[in-house]
């Protein structure tokens, strides 16, 4: 759900559980801010664990996959043109 827009960016509130598909965004960076819960961002070769209050920027072109063992609430910051599943 888009909760705000500014300067061509969207702020989105999302909930998810499980593994998202591997994808990348060739032209956009994405910022993930954990509101409630925890998840890990998997990259090819390593992963980063994130808990409430933590954030991570995934640079454009980097393949990634968010995974949550339990439901997590995340705020996303990304350009309005970003396609959810990447390219």
Image: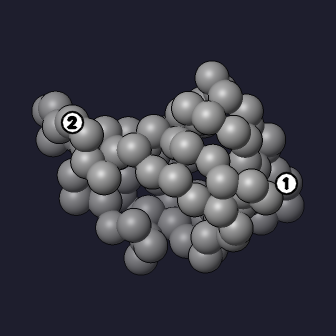
Residue 67 at x, y percent in the picture: 71, 60
Which residue shows up at 78% across the image and 43% down it?
48
Question: Where residue 76 appears, x then y in whole percent?
Answer: 43, 43
Q: Is residue 61 left or right of residue 28?
A: right
Q: Which residue is mark 2?
A: 4
Q: Is residue 38 left or right of residue 28?
A: right
Q: Which residue is mark 1?
A: 46
Q: In this view of the protein, can residue 24 be seen by the observer?
A: yes
Query: Horizontally, is 19 left or right of 73 in the view?
Result: right
Q: Residue at x 33, y 67 (%)?
A: 83
Q: Secondary structure at mark 2?
A: strand
Which mark is drawn over residue 18?
A: none
Q: Nearer the viewer, mark 2 or mark 1?
A: 2
**Label 2 to label 1: alpha-carbon separation:** 32 Å
Q: Could you classify mark 2 by the number of other residues whose Cα lies within 10 Å: few (under 14), some (14-19), or many (20 or more)?
A: few
Q: Who's the residue at 55% across and 71% down the image?
A: 23
- Percent position of residue 43, x then y: 73, 59
Can the viewer see residue 57?
no
Q: Position of residue 52 (x, y in %)?
A: 67, 28
Which residue is situated farthest in the right direction here?
45
Residue at the outermost top position: 53
């Amino acid at each position: 759900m888009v909760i705000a827009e500014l300067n061509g960016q969207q702020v989105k509130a999302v909930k998810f559980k499980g593994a998202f598909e591997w994808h990348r965004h060739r032209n956009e960076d994405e910022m993930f801010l954990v509101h409630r819960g925890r998840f890990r961002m998997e990259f090819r070769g390593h992963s980063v664990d994130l808990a409430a209050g933590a954030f991570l920027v995934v640079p454009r072109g980097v393949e990634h996959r968010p995974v949550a063992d339990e439901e997590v609430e995340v705020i996303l910051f990304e350009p309005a043109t970003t396609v959810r599943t990447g390219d």
